[in-house]
Amino acid sequence: MKFSKYILGLIFILLVSCSYSSNKDQKITTTSYPPPNLINKTQFAYPFPTTDYSSQFPTITSNPESGVLEFDIYNDGKPVSFYNFYLATVMKDPKTGLELSTSLDRTKAPHALSNKGGEVVFGNVPPGRYGIIIIIDISSYLLLNPKDGSTMFITVENNSRIDLGRLDYSDLPIN
């Protein structure tokens, strides 16, 4: 009992010492919010980028020892915007020369990003035979010919420019 009175007294002293005491002569002034100088103005704490990624691709100066591959990609008539694409090297059977599959090393493979209009341009691609890979979330997909579903391998040669035109898919697993 004595201990609980001691604790209650200690709590009372702490509450009284931490309480707010106001001066009767203190004046409280009010201000309007937002301040008049900020009305009809937008201010951000961090300057957001103003780059419009839908602009045309920059002119790529090609190395004569390489080529350029370009295409427009759509899914159900809508551009596939801001997806990563890679060129994967075609693997061949050393005995028969038969093309088996593709091999992708993301650290070394030619890479491109589609713009808002679905345009993809690979610049300065080393000569070789490639398959086009799209990265969706954590999965990678080899693009097939959208017209007939056949394998679509592309041969890039020195100083060449290959335009595949419009690739319109109906089954890409994207939103």
Image (spheres, rainbow, N blue to C red):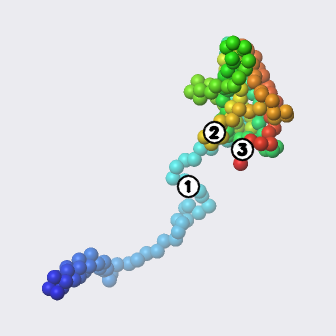
Judge depth for marks 3 and 1 and give the one in front.
3
Mark 3: secondary structure: loop
Does residue 102 appear anywhere in the picture? yes
Residue located 59% across and 63% down the image: 39
Instruction: Give the residue type at disc 3.
Output: Pro
Residue located 56% across and 61% down the image: 38
Q: Position of residue 9 (x, y in %)?
A: 19, 83
| Residue 138 against residue 93 in the figure, above or below | below
In 3D space, how far apart are the residues under numbered discs 2 and 3 (Cα atoms)?
A: 10 Å
Q: Position of residue 14 (x, y in %)?
A: 23, 77
The label on residue 139 is: 2
> Of 39 and 128, which appears nearest the observer?
128
Q: Position of residue 7 (x, y in %)?
A: 20, 80
| Residue 43 against residue 84 in the figure, above or below | below
Q: Which comes sooner in the sequence, label 3 or label 1?
A: 1
Mark 1: secondary structure: loop
Residue beneath disc 1: 43
The label on residue 173 is: 3
Instruction: Give the residue type at disc 1.
Output: Gln
Number of other residues with Cα within 10 Å of mark 2, as a class: few under 14, some 14 to 19, many 20 or more? few
Extreme residue in the front direction: 95
2 and 3 marks in contact (CB < 8 Å): yes
- Left of 51 or right of it: where is 161? right
